[in-house]
Image (spheres, coloured by chain):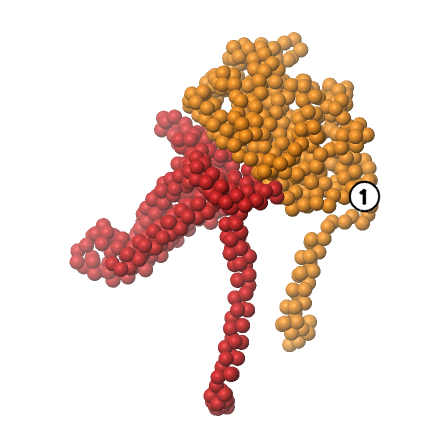
Amino acid sequence: MTPPLDLSRRQFMTAASVAAAAALLAGCAPGTNPASNAQTLQFWHLLSGGDGVTMSSLLDQVNAAQDAYKIRPTVLAWGTPYYTKLAMAGAGGRAPDVAIMHATRVNGWAPGGLLDDWDLDRLAELGVDESTFPTPIWEKGFVGDRLFSVALDAHPFVLMFNTDVCDAAGVLDSKGALKETSSPEEFLDQLRTVGGATEGHALSYGYLGDGAQMWRLFYGLYAQHGLAMELPVGGKAVIDKDAAVESLLFMQSLLDGEIAAAQNDYGSAIAEFATGKSGMLMTGVWELRTMQNAGIPFDATMIPTLYGTPAVYADSHSFVLPHQANANPVNRDLTYRFVADMLKGSFGWAEAGHIPAFLPVTSSPEYAELVPQAHYAEAADHVVYDPTAWFTGSGSNFQGEFGAAVQGVLLSGDDPAAAIDRFESRVNTLLAQPNPADPEGTWKP
Amino acid sequence: MTTTASATRAIVAAGASDFRPRRAGFQRREQLISWAFLAPFLVAFILFLAWPIAHGIFLSFTNQSLTGAGGAFVGFANYAEALTDPVMWQSMWNTVWFTLLSTVPLVAIALVMAALVDRGLPGQWLWRLSFFMPYLLASTVISQIWVWIFNPQIGAANNILTFFGLEPIAWLQNPDTNMLSIVIATVWWTVGFNFLLYLAAMQNIPSQQYEAASLDGAGAWRQFWSITLPQLGPATVLILLLQILASLKLFDQAYQMLGGVASDTTRSIVQYIYEAGFVSYRFGYSAAISYIFFALIVIVGVAQALVTRRRKEL
């Protein structure tokens, strides 16, 4: 018996391991595309699900429209996993060319040198400047007087309503829009009327175990008092107790088991509205597509202004330039082009529910006809972001801390004032800690 | 055969005539070979265990951040902050509380299950399989299963409660019940391992002892108390030790079942270490907390060693 290959066992093992190592190393080689000489740009983002599908088609669109660059996207799990990996890639000097961050997270990152700022002149050459964004959204991109993030969108917390149910309840005006309410009492009355026309609750609002959901509604209501929380580094949080307690009491009165279920988590609330069992839903705009797929008759609007000042809680998906150890000027230049192309092509992004930040898109006639998106587009002028501090923002612990402090108020009728005190003392503990990205506090914007 | 024997004799004789240098060379060679065999493990041990432990101690004295910033020596500042941090103590207590709540049922229920299977239930293999099966599932899977069971609106747990005319509970969201919910899920998940250890120990008890006891007129209960339980002593000590160490590691099922939400009543010390390092980016602080936790584990380990030594002396 002669083996087909006349090798000794050792020779065979050596040859096999060399082959395996070669295959392994080949996997490390950067991907090259011999067919085109387009420069590959690495782009990281955290958008999956419906948002991810829309983002992919936008990227295909910008890739196809030119041949100077080709975007190679990397999608990572939303929230902490994404931010941890992006920070570590930056710390290792091997960050992507461009990435998406929540605008509210930029403040914790810029001081560590993890991000480079945008060149305003270069952006202006490409038709991107202050005049092409709603003021609060453009301003949110700045840390000090340098621009660190360029918003793709604003994604506010809004009110969706079932048009059949609300029509039957008689709370729609002649144009089919929800009748305006301007005080907590009026809105509660309207909700009670709607409750009479549904088989389930008037309103769906899921909050259990979800600090972000509690914070989104609360901070919108708080800001409607014409106030903003201030969180000065090294100081004490400035929170208006009366406004905070009033907002929490209002949330309590929604969750009385009649207007809205007293115990509802995020998924159950979405399911309740999507199956037509409730009249209204308080939710982020990113659930728009879920409702369209559910096939229910619905429209959307800003959460009514109940305390005088129009204000809508929102965050923005924004483009940032992660700091690279050896930034390639060619890639950097193409990155500016890519971002401008994305902003100009962001009409498709509106289909996912988000309000495009680029004004030429939202002021176009096509957008005016895009319903229900156009019905809450006004929210872009009244967006309110998380208070500025290194520890706040989407996917941070701050919103979780808020939830831990106030859930008892909503779930079991605990004292709102005590809950706000607890939240405040926790925030003060965080304020006493230095920004870990800049522990010595030496960074100046 | 004879040739081999004479050859061996010749080698022995040659060795004897020139004993010392050859023997030393042989030993050196043997030592080298044994080190070569040990090397793969040693490299892994130093790279992934010894070095990280040493580096972690070093980190705990710095303000190193995940973002690459910091790294300056700060002495015992991290430890001082951790020891006065109410969230650290709350998390430490949550871990200890979970260990107390989970260890008792995990040992007691395993014992009962093993006794039932060992003594009488027909179809032993089926029971053995079904009691052990959940243990084979990944923590992500059991978390998903129990999130649905505990769902406040459509979960099975509340269905059962309302069937008996009780009020539904927000199991995982209510701070009064969320730790209990995690304990219930954990017991269901891991009791099979302890069950298996107990069953093996029971099947090792010689049947003559039971035969002798029944000849002397001892009933089933008497036999259980006077033969089975005392014979299970060493197994119980082992199970307790393994269980306490496993419970102290509480993180994944609690983190997953609560969707990563920080709740004051369920945040374990391991979760706080993770949050400090990977959410707040404070590696130095995170390392300091993990060494404080390490101290707790050492105390448990030493207590355990003292108890077992006393048992041996008795």
Q: Position of residue A125 (x, y in %)?
A: 81, 30
Q: Position of residue B273 (x, y in %)?
A: 49, 42
From where the camera sits, is residue B95 visible? yes
Which residue, given by chain and number where applicable, does mark 1 sit on? Answer: A38
Residue A326, picture quadrant: top right
Q: Position of residue B309 (x, y in %)?
A: 31, 57
Q: Residue at x 56, y 35 (%)?
A: A434
Q: Quadrant of the C terminus of chain B?
A: bottom left
- Please determine whether, in this image, residue A68 is positioned above or below residue A241: below
The amino acid pointed to by label 1 is Ala
Residue closer to the observer: B13 or B198: B13
> Tag 1's secondary structure?
loop
From where the camera sits, is residue A164 visible? no
Chain letter for the orange colouring in the rendering:
A
Residue closer to the observer: A19 or B79: B79
Mark 1 surroundings within 10 Å by alpha-carbon count, few (fewer than 14), some (14 through 19), many (20 or more): some
Which residue extends farthest left?
A: B216
- Please determine whether, in this image, residue A196 is positioned above or below residue A338: above
Q: Residue at x 79, y 32 (%)?
A: A122
The answer for which chain carries disc 1 is A
- Please determine whether, in this image, residue A127 is positioned above or below residue A309: below
Which residue extends farthest top?
A: A174
Which color was chain B given?
Answer: red
- Please determine whether, in this image, residue B51 is positioned above or below residue B152: below
Q: Residue at x 21, y 61 (%)?
A: B212
